Image (cartoon, rainbow, N blue to C red):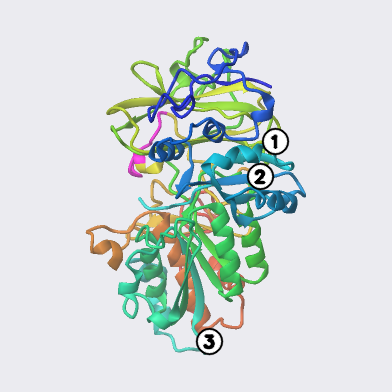
């Protein structure tokens, strides 16, 4: 197989400590002749992510704080002395893999599905996973995040619905599920901004047990309840894709009619496949549950191309082929997609290519200092035919100085012929200006909003009906229209208002759609499933942008035309 990068994070070789080690110390391997920036890796080690491979070489008595900090830079989180991992079983091998995992001392399987398994593994036992038959890849979980960067009720026509008598409404409260990263302060709002304590039900699926990690979910629930307070509210806290799948399954079993998810992940296939949360959302839809998820805030922090363009054949992708280029060992010119960042800023980058569920096209993701062209971070895992087409970097407080940094993408092996995408953390540019030199808003819908049975909600500024500049655009990579609908954002909530902020982002838009369906079921459509009520709602949406459905506004802006 092709070699691995010689520029590695500091854990490799251990002596590098917490800094990002660029010399590749600790492995005695020959350079790869095809790429001087890489070193060769024995094929039998390819199943484990490089961070996990490095953990197998850590001496006893190592500083766990260092290990944890290094792991976070590569997309891993620790709970006590264990690492949370995502295991991809070969087709039909899920049960056998789970049985083998539970035989490894200290391993705890947290959720298991045919497409992915999540497990908490003691750091000194990760090496055992490489020898388990039926595992094609062990990597970091898909982390979910809130979509953040009311006045919306009057804009969408909810006030007139609230004034209607109960025509064919329900005698029992509507059951609404809100799945989010955390619900800080929710108890202080029960009976006022939220339903009474007896009608608020909670479940914590997070492995770190931090149900109140953020107030984001509380603000989302507030908007839902602004539409109708006669709700049986179910709050589920999650942090990974596997936990989201568990939460959706639980909400379905509780009999909810509507699910709200103002969260998502930039690591997704773009065609609604290849991860367990999609399967559970499909099951929910078959049960008549309508699921609204944030379309994403990535329009200004996303780049896309239909193929890997390398006209000078030096191995580096050209983000813009119209600019003159010079082949060379290091990237230059349009082979660099640059951004500004401040010292100590948190940074997340994801490189994806449309070759799911497993790829032999082997690409690498590099972050360079623009002044020195010295790499500050590299993600270059092996793709040999069993791994997902993903490279991921997460830097927490490790940007060395204020300045300009540039992303480069290298092809190590395999032909092009598939679309390539790059995401950067949208918080970097505040949702107002492009984050990169080269930005492409099309195809920037995040997961699971790209799902076939998920309603993706974009955001319009509540008092102008203009699409929020950050609101992700469709279509999906397999050509489906997304977002499905848009709703108001930049609105007020008690949770964020007490801090002097408005609630912005598609996170704030999504509960407007959820609340609208809950209100309509309460007033006049109680005999219909949530999916049917949404179709009524969509048909009454207000067309904005180009005539007809489009990949910016979807069917239009939410509008509740009274019956």
Left or right: 268 in relation to 403: right
Sort mark 1 into few (<14), some (14-19) or many (20+) by Cα contacts within 10 Å.
Answer: some
* 327 lies above or below 318: above
Extreme right residue here?
92
Q: Determine the secondary structure under disc 2.
A: strand
* 136 lies above or below 532: above
Tell me where residue 338 appears, x and y as whole percent: 39, 26
Residue position for label 1? 386
Residue position for label 2? 88
Q: Which residue is found at the position 55% from the left and 74% from the top? A: 256
Q: Which residue is found at the position 30% from the left and 73% from the top? A: 188
Tell me where residue 339 appears, x and y as whole percent: 37, 30
CA separation in Å, label 2 and label 3? 44 Å
Query: Which numbered dot is residue 170?
Result: 3
**Magenta-highlighted residues:** 428-437
Q: Determine the secondary structure under disc 1.
A: loop
Residue 441 or 59: which is nearer the viewer? 59
**Quarter of the image with the N terminus in it:** top right
* 387 lies above or below 211: above
Q: Determine the secondary structure under disc 3.
A: loop
Q: Is 495 a magenta residue?
A: no
Residue 418 or 219: which is nearer the viewer? 219
Quarter of the image where one finds residue 290: bottom right
CA separation in Å, label 2 and label 1? 9 Å
- Confirm or deny contact between disc 2 and disc 1 (CB under 8 A): yes
Quarter of the image where one finds residue 353: top right
CA separation in Å, label 3 and label 1? 50 Å
Tell me where residue 298 appears, x and y as whole percent: 45, 44
Lower sequence index among marks 2 and 1: 2
């Amino acid at each position: 197989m092709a070699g691995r990068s010689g520029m590695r994070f500091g854990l490799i070789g251990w002596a590098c400590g917490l800094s990002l080690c660029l010399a590749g110390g600790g492995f005695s391997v020959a350079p790869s002749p095809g790429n001087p920036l890489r070193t060769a890796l024995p094929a039998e080690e390819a199943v484990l992510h490089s961070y996990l491979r490095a953990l197998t070489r850590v001496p006893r008595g190592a500083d766990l704080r260092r290990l944890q900090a290094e792991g976070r830079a590569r997309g891993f989180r620790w709970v006590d002395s264990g690492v949370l991992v995502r295991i991809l079983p070969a087709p039909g091998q899920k049960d056998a893999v789970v049985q083998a995992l539970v035989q490894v001392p200290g391993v705890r399987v947290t959720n298991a599905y045919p497409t992915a398994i999540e497990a908490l593994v003691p750091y000194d036992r990760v090496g055992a996973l490489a020898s388990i038959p039926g595992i094609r890849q062990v990597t970091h979980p898909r982390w979910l995040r809130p979509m953040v960067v009311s006045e919306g009720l009057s804009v969408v026509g909810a006030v007139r619905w609230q004034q209607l008598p109960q025509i064919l409404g329900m005698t029992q409260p509507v059951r609404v599920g809100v799945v989010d990263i955390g619900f800080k302060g929710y108890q202080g709002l029960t009976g006022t901004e939220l339903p009474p304590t007896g009608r608020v039900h909670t479940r914590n699926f997070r492995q770190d047990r931090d149900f109140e990690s953020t107030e984001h979910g509380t603000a989302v629930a507030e908007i839902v309840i602004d539409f109708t307070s006669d709700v049986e509210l179910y709050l589920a806290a999650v942090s990974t894709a596997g936990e989201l799948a568990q939460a959706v399954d639980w909400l379905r079993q509780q009999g909810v009619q509507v699910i709200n998810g103002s969260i998502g992940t930039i690591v997704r296939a773009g065609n609604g496949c290849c991860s367990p949360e999609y399967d559970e959302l499909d099951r929910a839809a078959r049960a008549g549950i309508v699921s609204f998820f944030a379309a994403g805030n990535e329009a200004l922090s996303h780049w896309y191309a239909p193929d890997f363009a390398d006209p000078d054949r030096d191995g580096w992708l050209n983000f813009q082929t119209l600019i003159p280029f010079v082949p060379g060992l290091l990237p230059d010119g349009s082979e660099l997609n640059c951004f500004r960042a401040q010292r100590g800023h948190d940074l997340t980058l994801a490189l994806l290519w449309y070759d799911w569920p497993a790829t032999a096209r082997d690409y690498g993701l590099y972050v360079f200092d623009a002044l020195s062209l010295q790499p500050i971070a590299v993600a270059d895992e092996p793709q040999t035919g069993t791994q997902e087409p993903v490279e991921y970097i997460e830097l927490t407080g490790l940007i060395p100085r204020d300045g300009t940094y540039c992303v480069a993408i290298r092809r190590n092996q395999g032909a092009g012929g598939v679309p390539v995408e790059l995401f950067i953390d949208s918080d970097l540019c505040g949702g107002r200006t492009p984050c990169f030199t080269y930005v492409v808003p099309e195809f920037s819908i995040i997961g699971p909003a790209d799902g076939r049975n998920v309603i993706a909600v974009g955001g319009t500024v509540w008092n102008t009906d203009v699409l929020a500049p950050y609101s992700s655009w469709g279509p999906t990579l397999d050509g489906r229209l997304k977002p499905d609908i848009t709703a108001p954002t930049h609105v007020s909530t008690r949770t964020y208002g007490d801090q002097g902020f408005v609630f912005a982002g598609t996170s704030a838009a999504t509960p407007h759609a959820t609340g609208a369906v809950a209100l309509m079921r309460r007033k006049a459509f109680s005999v219909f499933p949530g999916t049917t009520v949404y179709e009524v709602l969509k048909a009454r949406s207000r067309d904005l942008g180009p005539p007809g459905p489009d990949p910016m506004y979807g069917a239009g802006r939410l509008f509740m035309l009274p019956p």
